Image (spheres, rainbow, N blue to C red):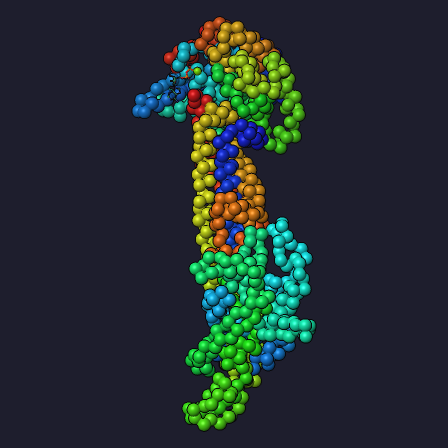
Amino acid sequence: MTAVAPPKASPLATSASDGPILHAQNLRKTYKLGRIKVPVLRGVDLQIRTGQSIAVLGASGSGKSTLLHLLGGLDHADKPSADAPPPSILFKGTDLLKASTRTLDTFRRRRVGFVFQFYHLLPELSVLQNVTVAAMAATGAFEYWANRSAIRTRAMKLLERVGLGHRIMHRPAELSGGERQRVAIARALINEPDLLLADEPTGNLDRNTGASILDLFSDLHRSGQTMVVVTHDESTASRCDRIVRLVDGRVQNS
Amino acid sequence: MYQLLLTKRYLSSKIMPLLAALAVALCTAMVIVVWSVMGGFLVMLINSGRTLAGDVSISWPITGFAYYDDLIKRLESDPTIAAATPMIDTYGLIGLPDGRTETVQVQGIDGPSFSRVTGFGDILYWRPIDRPTEKDIGKQDLRLTRHDLWGDLLKGGLNLARIERSKANPQGTERPAVVLGISVSGFNFREPWGFFPGLPMIRGESGEKKPVDIFMLPVDGSVTLNVLPMDSKGRAIEMVARTFPVANEFYSGLYEIDRKRVFVQLKALQDMLKMNRAVKIENTGGVKVSANPDEESFTSAKVVGESPARVTNVLVRGKQDVFDTRDADALATRVAQIYREFAAAHEGQVPDSTTIRIQTWADQNATMIGAVKKETALVLFIFCFVSLTAVFLVLAIFWAMVSEKTRDIGVLRAIGASRSGIAGLWVFYGLAIGLAGSLVGFVLAYSVVTNINAIHEWMGQYLKLYIWDPRVYYFSRIPSQLDPGHVVIVLLGGVLASCLGALWPAARAARMNPVEALRFE
Ligand SMILES: Nc1ncnc2c1ncn2[C@@H]1O[C@H](COP(=O)(O)OP(=O)(O)O)[C@@H](O)[C@H]1O
Ligand SMILES: [Mg+2]
């Protein structure tokens, strides 16, 4: 099920080689509820190749979001222990599990884009600002100021691409769910991430709206975007190159 | 950068932070107003204290010292000294035309030289004026018309003399007279616009006001002054009373002085206090200064010489302004030196240079100035402490806002914001609120301080609320002075306080786990 994707035309993109852009091994995540330990991930292995689109399928509560947060450097996996093989998340040779907070911050800024089920737009900002704010977070104030018109143009282009070019001054509250998710996608793409991580992007949308969002993802994939889409919906998953199932805290390739 | 954007958005879309800014504004305004009024009070106190005291005073109370003319000559020939003047400082009783008697501070002065030293001439109230005073919208000030009358009074006031003209003598003759503080007689009433018209009424026996024909003390009133002469050993001789016409009245602005001080011609007071030139007679007990050269002595005394006229004080004014106490001290040192030379020249005839009292204006008002300074510090401390509530208000509001914005914080972290970036967002936000609050506070304080007397009068007129009663406070106007240095300190304090209040919530926001923040409902 390996997809051969064209190289992405972006300076941040990895080389055209279809070697793994991200390689996770033996990921474990255990939550503690008081004294009780709740193991959610019990040794996950996952390889993502450049240009691939991967669907992570699993029942609700199976740990899909947890996995995605680990891959995006947003959460910490369990510390290595003696009775388990050593965990690692290699991103282009760098182990995220051993990286400093600074490196992780930079990684999130430059390398990944998150799309969430509940969009998570900032309610005070306009549509356009919700997109550019990610560029602001990714650059220093002076750098942003120097490149602000270029960034703005990029944001406009992205918003046009997701079909919201005419609503840039609106507030998120004035948009429908599908439109909000499109803004969130544009935000995730503004820093030209190597990896797009989407957590049930259609989970909160009706079938038709969801389908159009998925069309957008397919479109992005065709233009070379590497992505991991978390879902519990088989039909959503079937649009991806590869499906992995999360069962009992482990990955089952299908 | 996103900090700036979000701060701007949060500021314009939330009501709570505006309340925090308002609290900061009120606190800074409060502290600035208090500091300005207390500071202005102090400066006014110092200046008013100086108005009638000179820079340095040489004093030998009650019995006084002689050869002061020589001392003044020596002082005035010094290049650092502008002028010096003799004075007698004592207490007495004044009998007023309506039968009232009051205790007063009586000072015998030589008008022209006293004016050079203390600026006495500038505070004489009855004088011709061309323009109405600030608040005198109705131009009711009597001094605007009849300039010839006020001109005579001004001249009389300066010389402590009443000029009495008649048809036979149009030039007029001068009679020794007194100059009263504007509030001594109780016949002058302070109007809201701040002047004292001639009194059309007089107080009756039981205190009620009875209308009479226009009666003005300096024009045709006289008062009786009672003073107590002492002998050279400080023993009281019999009380002496004399009636003086009133030449003018003065308005120093310092209520205690305006209420209690009476100036009288130096010569006249010397006569009354037996401090004029006297004949020395011999006694079995030794040399005795007789109060009256004509007086029969019990022992058949032999005239052994003459005792020169005496005064209790010589007031000195330096050429350079001595508002700074160090300059005043330098002047006092110079005066002490001159006195030493003077005392050496009059060995045994004047108080010794080690016992004479030489004080600067600051020494003389030290208790009062020190008290006001301490009071200022204390009041400021209390108000700053009260202003700490602003810190807690900012803290509480920010704490609530951080909770409310938990998910947004998670989102920002997910798009790459660092912990310090998130902390920076809230501190920056606190800074913005502090800046906005301080700025509004400054505008508020500025308008209050510059209009404080108008506000006070308005409150008195419409709310019947007189906070600053001239009978309680020293000044009839609320003094205030906006010191740029103080303003900057307070404004910086306001900014700092809100940053401080933002610090803890900011740390909490920074410590948040982004994943939990994102899951936050
Ligand atoms: N902070 C937490 N503390 C304890 N348990 C948690 C925490 N976060 C998630 N879980 C649990 O971990 C499991 C996996 O959660 P999640 O990754 O969100 O699943 P999914 O996204 O597949 O629905 C769930 O049972 C959830 O209750
Ligand atoms: Mg989930």
Front-lying residue, A91 or B78:
B78
What residue lies at 61% left-to-right and 63% top-to-bottom?
B126
What residue lies at 53% left-to-right and 71% top-to-bottom?
B107
Decide if residue A184 is on the left or right side of residue B153.
left
Q: Which quadrant: the C terminus of chain A? A: top left
Q: Is residue B189 visible?
A: yes
User: Residue B407's x, y, as percent?
Assistant: 47, 24
Decide if residue B17 is on the left or right side of residue A43.
right
User: Residue B384's x, y, as percent?
Assistant: 46, 47
User: Residue B39's x, y, as percent?
Assistant: 53, 54
What residue lies at 39% left-to-right and 14% top-to-bottom?
A61
User: Residue B165's x, y, as percent?
Assistant: 65, 71
Count all numbered tags in the image, as a single digit.
Answer: 0
With respect to residue A35, does B212 lie above or below? Answer: below
Write down the quadrant of residue B44 in the picture. Answer: bottom right
With respect to residue A250, does B89 lie above or below? Answer: below
With respect to residue B17, does B76 lie above or below? Answer: below
With respect to residue B399, does B236 lie above or below? Answer: below
Q: Is residue B496 visible?
A: no
Front-lying residue, A43 or B513:
B513
